[in-house]
Image: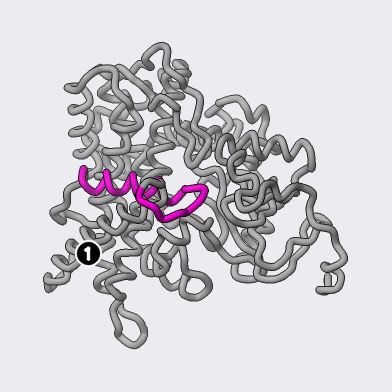
Amino acid sequence: METSADISNLPLPPGSSGLPLLGETLAFIQNTGKFVEDRRLLHGDVFRSHVLGDPIVFLLGPEANRWIFAGENKYLRNRWHLAARKLLGKQSVAMLNGGDHLDRRRLLAPHFTYAAMRHFVPRIEAIVQRHCEQWLSGTQPFKAVDAVRALVFEVAIVLMMGESQVDPAYMSRLFKQWVAGLFAAVPVDLPFTAFGRGVAAEKELRAYIDSLVAEREKRTEQPPDTLGSLLSARDEQGRPLSRDAIIDELELLLFAGHDTTVTATSNLMMLLAQYPEVLERCRREQQELAEQGPLTLESLRAMPYLHQVIQEVMRFIPPIAGAFRVTTEDVSYGGYRIPKGWQVSLNIRAAHKGAPWTSPERFDPERMGPERCEQKPQGAYIPFGGGPRVCVGQHFAMVEMAAVAALLLRGYQWELAPGQDLSLIPFPIPLPRDGLLVRFSRR
């Protein structure tokens, strides 16, 4: 067992701190994948940098991911970058650590089990069909990313707030401005900066959600949605959650359950259009199931190939490139010293694009099937993270993506408009630069 003296004698990982204050943030934001790969080729799977306001060590590969997951609440704790720490509520599950984090997860988890999705499937189906009809009647081609974003946002609101009287378009506009501030490279609170606009949007969004919570508090019984659970929760002393904690949690759930699903669903549409043989096999599977009537949780389970495709989409283009932890003491990894207070990067993209995957740069849903099911050691496939902080909403995300994809495949077809830029925006989430322009029609 290494002592603190042993660790203090180890060298820092190779790398550079970059410019004063900014560090290497601009290069990181401009092309995160290239940033990591260039430095991996230069330094190996362990290197340091300075991005988004903090010194950071990048650890790449499944073994590194297992070390990070094992270190939760021991030598590591969760930490968001500076802008997010200022704009995400301090009482949300993402910002909590240790026992407080586990307690909040226990409160939220029952709403996000696979079985709990059963009564949401018909509501998701109704929302998807209504939005698809709107897509048909709109101008062609249109930006599928924006259309999917509006659909997913409404689904998230229904999951969290049930039939509360909300204005999805108003909330979505504020939400988009707020999230842009979350990923500001330099969080300066001025009206003309992305961060300043994010601060203003969060304040307005918070006031709106506060009014919704106040209205729901008047009910003698709460419906079985996330807001109802948060309002009904009591601690060991019988005390309810504070209003601020409830709003923090709802904002976080909107954020966590929105952009990642938008990314995976949009990129699923893009890849199916680019791989007609995969699209055709998906359609054949749906033709056999469509005669059974409306979607149910059971019918969604009976779509093995579609689930393979969704899993491969998230491997091929991870919805989130990575996450951050911070060291709570001086630690060592790979023969290097990582000082207390430094950030550690959990790199999902690197795990999905390296060993042990066969030809990882090829989109190949067959790799996820039972015939070939490539051996995946723990830490090699982590689209929802892992360890104690694995995404609490992963089952909901999979049900939602499968339902949207199944309904698209059954009733509609789409073609990519020619001449658009399909390269991916690398930060903060990977989406086609031109918004995925499609021509949409009924089958």
Q: Quadrant of residue 267?
A: top left
| Residue located at (35% from left, 81% from top) | 235
Residue 40 on image: x %, y %: 74, 40
Residue 359 on image: x %, y %: 66, 27
Is 138 rendered above or below residue 154? above
In the shown orientation, is residue 37 left or right of residue 227? Answer: right
Decide if residue 102 is in sight here: yes
Q: Which residue is mark 1?
A: 210
From which residue to which does the magenta span run?
169-191
In the shown orientation, is residue 336 left or right of residue 360? Answer: right
Task: Please name the colour scheme applied to the rendered image.
Answer: one colour
Residue 245 on image: x %, y %: 33, 70
- How would you rate the neighbour count of disc 1 (Cα within 10 Å): few for under 14, some for 14-19, many for 20 or more? some
Q: Amino acid at mark 1?
A: Asp
| Front one among 184 and 410 | 184
| Residue located at (28% from left, 79% from top) | 240
| Front one among 265 and 396 | 265
Q: In the rendered picture of this protein, how many numbered marks are placed on residues?
A: 1
Residue 382 on image: x %, y %: 56, 47
